Image: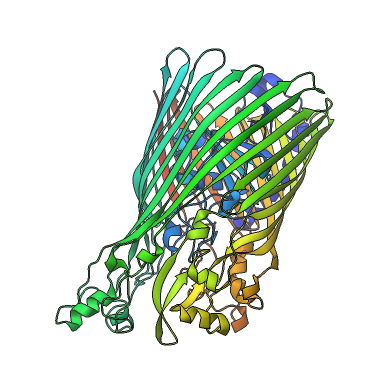
Amino acid sequence: MRRAILLALYGTAGLAAVTPLTGMAQSTTNAEKLVEPPLQTLTIVGSRKLNSSATETPVPVDFIPVSKAAESGGQFDLAQTLANISPSFNSTRQTGADGADLVDSAALRGLGSDQTLVLVNGKRRHTVSLVNLFGARNRGNTGTDMNAIPVMAISNIQVLRDGAAAQYGSDAIAGVLDISLKKSLGCEASFGYSQYSAGDGKNYAPSAYCGFRVGEAGVIGITAEYTDRGRSNRADPGNPRTIGDARVTGPTVYINGEVPNGGGDKFYFTLGNQQRRASSAAWARGGVGTDDIPSRNSAAMYPGGFVPYINGDINDIYGIAGYRMRVGEWSADLSQTYGYNRLKYEISNTLNASIANKDLTSGGKGISPSVFDAGGFSFAQATTNLDFSRYFDNWFMGTNVAFGAEYRYEKYQIFAGEPGSYIDADGVGVGGNAGSQGFPGFQPGDSTNKNRNSIAAYVDIEADLTSKLKLQTAVRGERYNDFGSTLTGKLAASYQVVDGFLGRASVSTGFRAPSLQQVYFSSTFTDFISGKPMDVVLAPNGGTVANAAGIPKLTEEKSKSYTLGLTFKPNQQFSATADLYRIDISDRIVLSGRFDATNYPALGAVLSGLGVGQAQFFVNSISTRTQGLDLTSSYKTNFASGKLTTYFAANFSKTDVTKVKAPAALKGYEDVLLSERERLFIEQGGPRRKATLSFNYEQGPWNGEFKIIHYGPQTLGTFSGTANGVANAYYAPKTSADMALTYAVNDSTKITVGANNVFNVKPNRQDPNETDNGFYYDSVQFGLGGASYFVKLWKKF
């Protein structure tokens, strides 16, 4: 069955290129009544000219309506919803990766999550305070938490699949996601329930939106949602591990609106807040009869062993206030954006083994507290924009000129945990390990309170040189007070060969500023190096340890992007796009491996003098090349007595590390700086191909959807590595299918039942001793939960 579906995936894609020619005789009237395809046309992201089209823009843009997902979609959070629609979008739900289990970051085209810029209503959205570390995809990256925005609040999402740093600034190397929030009148609500076929992972998702009139023409839309997702576990019976989805609960509220002020002027605003508590499981600790007593456990507390839980209290705030006005012949937009993300750790079902061991040796039972405040971190970003735009209809065939300036302020903090979360109470090397098991708390020496600012200016020109030839140019300069200045540019063009057939191309330079999280993240814990207790440090850039090791100051990543594509839209029923791309990134920032006296004796001696046994650093040290092809195709037609929409999209992408450039102090130790395992994280953290084929059929009150999602192969590293004779982990291609059936009771009420991954497909098994999370499967984008079922009720008021 799975092979048949895979053949259908490619066969139907090819057939879709032929079948439109047989359907051109249908009347426009009938075509206009058909169901809209998953990717529509109207978009503005990547262009400051209104009323562009996805098949007419010089760069590839997807327009994704989200209302159907809110009404009847089987995925209840935004990251998984997008991952099942857009093949270019990557999001991996992780397990066994500490804090990265709690946040699903966004990424495009197989690049890092911090190389994709996310906008909300055209304004920059902040990243999270978390930097992904141990066993995580996007290792060493920060990213944007897509699940902080409720699906019900969204009108559409525009995906710009092209480098856009010259237009929007830092982070837009892989592309841009622009999330447009609703401002419609009326109320709607939905309630969804889902669970895995294994019986766990119960997910309750009530959500509601109401849009109200303000004054004569203003509107304010309010969305409220509550998430209650249960934990899932795929560990074998009798295995103390907990492997699966994290437990997530909490409310989210978003307010979005605008109030006109006459003459085309308007005040607009957005305010959102999410309070989320998430909980994931760390590695299990053994009980009586294992080496974990007394080093990591206490016989008095957990004689049968235990699993510590890493709990995160996440507070995410986002706000926009702006005013659009006319200044003579120019349109002006003044806005202030603020974002704040805080993650505080609480470690439960745990102990500090050194406290328990001290209690035991002092005549007690061997007891430690079982819950610890382990500290955390926060990130705040405030962005001020002033933009001007004017359309000149007498320049060529029409020219749009835009320019503007931006000021951004950022602040990053690390908070120390309570002493019990990190101290070694019974003395270094005595018996019990220091700190809370599962996640040792941040120490006072890790505390950080740093900030920076930047200022930018840009010019953006789009011209219709002839009725067939469009040209787009942009230049942007930015200056950061912590690393200097950068200048980026972009040139894009499209040419309409014949009606309905367009060629397009672009070339651009880009950059990504090192995040404050990468510059200043600090974590310290005690381990035994060659039998001696020593600090293991993830050292902040510019700190004592990094400077002693000769680690240079972090600077920006630089990129060059190229696209070459075709669009084909012969009629209202069919459209197709094909875009080749290449992205070269130099000075890419990575998290190094651990350096110590064993793998680098000279540096190990320097570290030992500082009381450090092992250290790792963020370094600008690699160059990568990403090449790929994006395909989309949509066809709609009358079929039998109903309406059928077929949609196909695919992404083929390959990232290679082309160069490892070690700083002078680390020359000759490139294999420690970037091991084979870490290189594969970068090259194949996401599948090298991904495709979606969906069929939507509507007849009377019934609507059915069948979606096939194909994930290409991945090769990931092992702990032992090929140098020690252990083959890398190969994850074979997998194909899953989702289906849903919706019945419209009336115009305002719909009921949907469906299933995700209906064939219960799972990744092929690996050696659990060699995977990142110690389980049969690494955290791969395909997921390891298996089949799930859902029901959803939607009501409009």
With respect to residue 596, does 786 lie above or below? Answer: above
Could you say which is closer to the camera, residue 304 or residue 2?
304
Q: How many marks?
A: 0
Residue 72 on image: x %, y % = 47, 36
Could you say which is closer to the camera, residue 691 or residue 155?
155
With respect to residue 145, does 51 lie above or below? Answer: above
With respect to residue 180, does 660 lie above or below? Answer: below
Q: How is the image coloured?
A: rainbow
Q: Residue at x 70, y 50 (%)?
A: 10
Residue 522 on image: x %, y % = 45, 64
Residue 266 on image: x %, y % = 52, 20
Q: Residue at x 56, y 69 (%)?
A: 592
**Which quarter of the picture shows residue 447?**
bottom left
| Extreme residue in the bottom direction | 531
Instruction: Residue 299: tell me if it is visible.
Output: no
Image quarter of the N terminus = bottom right
Compared across the picture, whether 659 is left or right of 758 comes to: right
Instruction: Residue 265: tell me if it is visible.
Output: yes
Residue 574 on image: x %, y % = 71, 33
**Which quarter of the picture shows residue 219?**
top left
Image quarter of the C terminus = top left
With respect to residue 560, does 187 lie above or below? Answer: above
Q: Residue at x 38, y 42 (%)?
A: 274
